[in-house]
Image (spheres, rainbow, N blue to C red):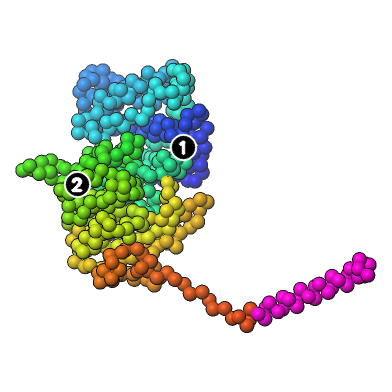
Amino acid sequence: MALSNEQKNKMWALLNQTRGQIGLTAYKDYIFGLLFYKYLSEKATQWLGEVLRGDTWENVYGQDPVRALDYMKQKLGYAIQPKEFFKDWEAAIHEERFNIPMISDTFGHFNQQIAFEAKDDFEGIFDGMRFDSSDLGSNAQARASVMISMIELLSAPEFDLSTGGDTVSDIYEYLLEKFATVLASDMGQYYTPKEISEVMARILTFGKADEDNFSIYDPAVGSASLLITTASHMKHSNQRGAIKYFGQEKDATPYRLARMNLMMHNIEYNDIQIHHADTLESDWPDGVIEGKDTPRMFDAVMANPPYSAHWNNKEREDDPRFREYGIAPKTKADYSFLLHCLYHTKESGRVAIILPHGVLFRGAAEGRIRKALIDKHQIEAVIGFPDKLFLNTGIPVCVLILKKNRANSDILFVDASQGFEKMKNQKQLRPEDIDKITETVIHRKAVDKYSHLATLEEVIENDYNLNIPRYVDTFEEEESIDLADIQGQIDEVDAEIAKANQTLANYFKELGVFK
């Protein structure tokens, strides 16, 4: 069952009550880490309940600790020793014997009990929590007090994960969105509004929703919301092994959050492969075959990369991702991310990438890359969105849809900038806006003052400029004005003013104000 607005509001109020003196940026690392450990604890508890057959974990562990832990690792990818579950911390708090070493030792043991094949998924996932940090307090007692308040908070009914299913993922996604909202400058770049994610996901999965062997990749994975939304449109997303999730993330915090987010959506660790790396510096080879890197290819690639980022573009001419198109400027990496996405897409796959509008018309190196993409018929659609949709920027963005091998050379332009709901400080796409965009793109519709299917010849006539207003005319003629009618209305008003002035003058005269 989805969380109600009342539950969400209470949850956020509880968080604010327990935050105390900790800065919100640091606080989020502890809350997300503890919430994820609670999830892992309850998942392990449920699994133990199914396999122990009336025995206790303490008894099984006591007989052969190594064998017991290895069995859990084989099934879950991780293992938790007895007395180190989240519920054990709760009990220690209740009995007034909780201390910081209890929790730091738990995470130390956890890191030692990660299955080899699950290293990429769990290793370092709790590194955002430093139990000797002054963020928590100036001494051990103060730090313990803060941790107690957080554990008690996550023990509240609002954070009950025992029902599993959508409740767990709903809680995590809600907290991600709230923290991204209040920490826009810090987290906003890692969070893609779910409405734009929905548009991209529907387009990427159209005609492929029935497939049971599908790979998706986000090279700037952030919190993994794009991966999760895309997979939600696949009919077999709940089937183990049907969807494979891949991603790369340069920054440590979202790298941890992405893995937590995926697993708390009940995705098995062996279906997840998230790398901690700079996508433009560290491409993703699958191994060396006859002296050459063999890159992984994916069915769908989606990205919301940092806009116009600086990157090292020196000696890139032989990079297979870029050599057929050109090298993006060192101060604008937008096309580097786009070409990376396209390169890693299967011949039958599709790309959806969010970028600033500048990529549509900027010249020089970017103009040459754009021309190559157009001449290769690889741009399917250009969608323009309203401004103020994102948490970390007010600029309007566009989404480019690309395929490697297209028979057709036309490009669909969609101006969706006027369809939105005005919120307090932002704008938001409505369900009808999402439906209109996706239907227009999927069926390549030409809609008056909304979309246009441009031929290659039209694009060439525009010097390969893809600026949307060149193709979609949204001009609305203003209603004609009858000047004679307007003059008549002015005369009537003047007559009423003159009459009122005369009446006022008569009153003053009667009162003897004027003689």
In terms of image quadrants, where is residue 487?
bottom right
* Residue 197 tag number: none
Residue visible at 22% across and 39% down in the picture: 270
Residue visible at 37% across and 18% down in the picture: 101
Is 276 inside the magenta-drawn segment?
Answer: no
The amino acid type found where label 1 is placed reads: Glu
Residue 266 % position (x, y): 31, 41
Residue 312 % position (x, y): 25, 43
Q: Which residue is mark 1?
A: 158
Q: Given the current orientation, which residue lies at the most extreme bottom position?
A: 484
Label 1: which secondary element: helix
- Image quarter of the N terminus: top left
When the figure is inspected, residue 247 is found, relative to residue 515, above or below; the finding is above
- Image quarter of the C terminus: bottom right
Front-most of residues 483 and 401: 483
Q: Is residue 253 left or right of residue 495?
A: left
